Image (cartoon, rainbow, N blue to C red):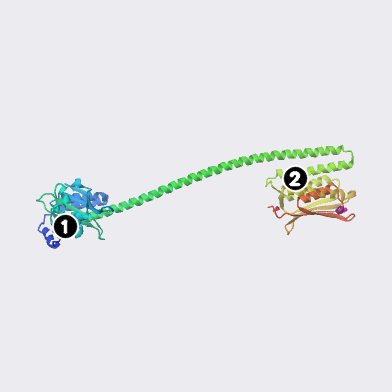
Amino acid sequence: MNTAPRFHPGDRARDLTTIATALRGRQGSPNLRLEAAAWRQLAGALTADPSTALSCALDIALGLCHAGTAGLSLLKTDAANGTTVRWELVHGALASYEGLDTPVSSSPCGLCLDAGATILVSRPVKAFAWLEHTQPAIFEELIAPLHDSQGSVEGTLWIAHHDRRSHCSADDVRILEQLAQQIVLALRLQEHARDREHALSVLQSLQAAQQDLLSHDLTEERTRRDQAEAAEHEAHRALMFKEAMIDEVNHRTKNTLQAAASLLSLQARIAPSAETRSALLESRDRLQLMAEVHSMISDARADSQAVLMPQLLQTLCDALRGSFGSNYPGVSLELTSDALSLPVEDAIAIALLANETVTNSYKHAFPDGSAGAITVQLHSAPDHTLVLRIMDSGLGADLAHTAGGMGLKLMRTLAAQLRGTLEIVSHAGSAGTQVTLTMNRQSVAQRAY
C-alpha cells in the first residue's frame, strides 16, 4: 500500500513514518474498470501525441481522485531569481493561476522535493502566506515528485481539495504516483520530439543551404558557359574575318607578283642588249619563284606560320626542270630533304638561295649541252645545325675569288639573313662546284609529322 507523509506547516521535523499513517485509514473503494479505461486513454495519448498526454493525466487525476484542482509544476532555473516552481499546467478550480512562478523554497512543491517522496499538506496557507490570494482556498494538497530512473527531478504533480469535507486517500497516492511516472515519460517523449524537430530543422536548413549553393553554382556555371560560348563565337567571327582578309591579301599579292613578272618579260623583249635582257629574265624568274612559294603557302591547310621544306624544294626543282630541261636534257636535278618545317621567312630565303645556285649551275656548269647532275640536299645535322648543300658535276668556276655577279651577291645577302655561313668550293677547270649553307636552327626548326 502506498502512503504519503502528512506535513503540517510549521512542524516539518515530525517523523515522516508516523505522519504517513494518517492515510492508512483512508481506504477508498477504487473503481478498477474506470482506472483501466483511464490508463488506456493515457497510453493512447502518449502514443499519438505526447504533448496531449499532460492534459490527459491531469484530467485523470481530477476524475479518479475526485479533486478540485490538479496541477503540474515544473522546475525553472533563472539567472536572476534562481530556481523557481512554475505552475506549468493547471486543471480545475485554480486553472486561472496557470503560469504562476514561486521560489522553490517558498512552495509546497519544495517540501515534496526536499522529502523526495509523495507528501500530504494540510492547510498549506498557514506556512505559505502567498496562497491566501488563491481562490478557492486549498484545505488539503497531495504532491508527488517527478523524477526519472536516473534521479533527475523535473517538478511535481499535485491535487488539491477546496472542500473541508474532502480528503485524499491511499488510492489517491497510488494513482498520483502512477500518473507521475507517465508524466515523466511524456516529458521525455516531448524532449526527444523537440530534439528530433531541431535535428530535422538543422537538416532542412542544411539541405536548403546546399540547394541554394547548388543553384548558385549552376547559375555561375551557366553564366560562365554563356560567356565562354559568346567569347568562342566572337573569336570564331574574328577568325573568319582574319581568314577573309588573309585570302584577300594573298590574292592581291599573287596578282601583283604575276603582273611584275609579266612587266619584266615585256621589258626583256625590248631590251637593247643581251646582258640587260638576261638580267631582266633572271629577275622575272626570281619573281615567278616567289609567286610559286607564296601560292603554295597560301593554299596550305596547315599552320600558315611554318612551311614544309620537302614540298617547297620539290616545287622549286619542278619549276627549274620546266625552265631549263629543254635546253639541258642531259642534266638531271635530284632532291633529298629531311622532313623539316621552317618559318615562312626562313623557308623563302632558303628557296631563293637554292634557286640562284641551281640556276647558276644550269647556265655555267654544263656548256655546249654537256650532261651531268645537280643535287640539292637539306639535312639536319646532329650538332643542331641545318645544312643546305647544292652540288653539280659540271665545269667548275673560280667563284670563290671573285665578287661574282648579281646572283652571288644575292646568295650572300640571303645567307646573312639566315644567320648562316656560306661556303663555295669550286676551281676553274675542275669537275664540279659545291655550295654549302650551314645554319644554326635549333631555336626555330621543327620536325614535321
Q: Mark 1 vs mark 2: which is more N-terminal?
A: 1
Q: Is residue 386 magenta?
A: no
Q: Tell me the SS state at disc 2.
A: helix
Q: Nearer the viewer, mark 1 or mark 2?
A: 1
Q: Position of residue 21 (x, y in %)?
A: 11, 60
User: Three-letter amino acid code at disc 1?
Assistant: Ile
> Are the two marked residues, 1 and 2, in contact with CB atoms closer than 8 angstroms?
no
Give the residue displayed 64% in from the left and 40% down from the top: 240
Q: Is residue 398 magenta?
A: yes
* Crowdedness near tag 1: few (<14), some (14–19) or many (≥20) residues, C-alpha within 10 Å: many
From the viewer's side, name the closer residue of 392 and 114.
114
Q: Which residues are magenta?
A: 397-401
How far apart are labels 1 and 2 at the CA level? 117 Å
- For residue 265, above or below residue 114: above
Q: Main secondary structure of the magenta part?
A: helix
The N terminus sits in image quarter: bottom left
Return the residue at label 2. Answer: 293
From the viewer's side, name the closer residue of 309 and 287.
287
- In the shown orientation, is residue 45 left or right of residue 355? left
Give the residue displayed 20% in from the left and 59% down from the top: 114
Q: Position of residue 120 (x, y in %)?
A: 15, 56
Task: Give me the disc on residue 315.
Answer: none
Q: Position of residue 137 (x, y in %)?
A: 13, 48
Q: How many labels were placed on the picture?
A: 2
Return the residue at label 1. Answer: 119
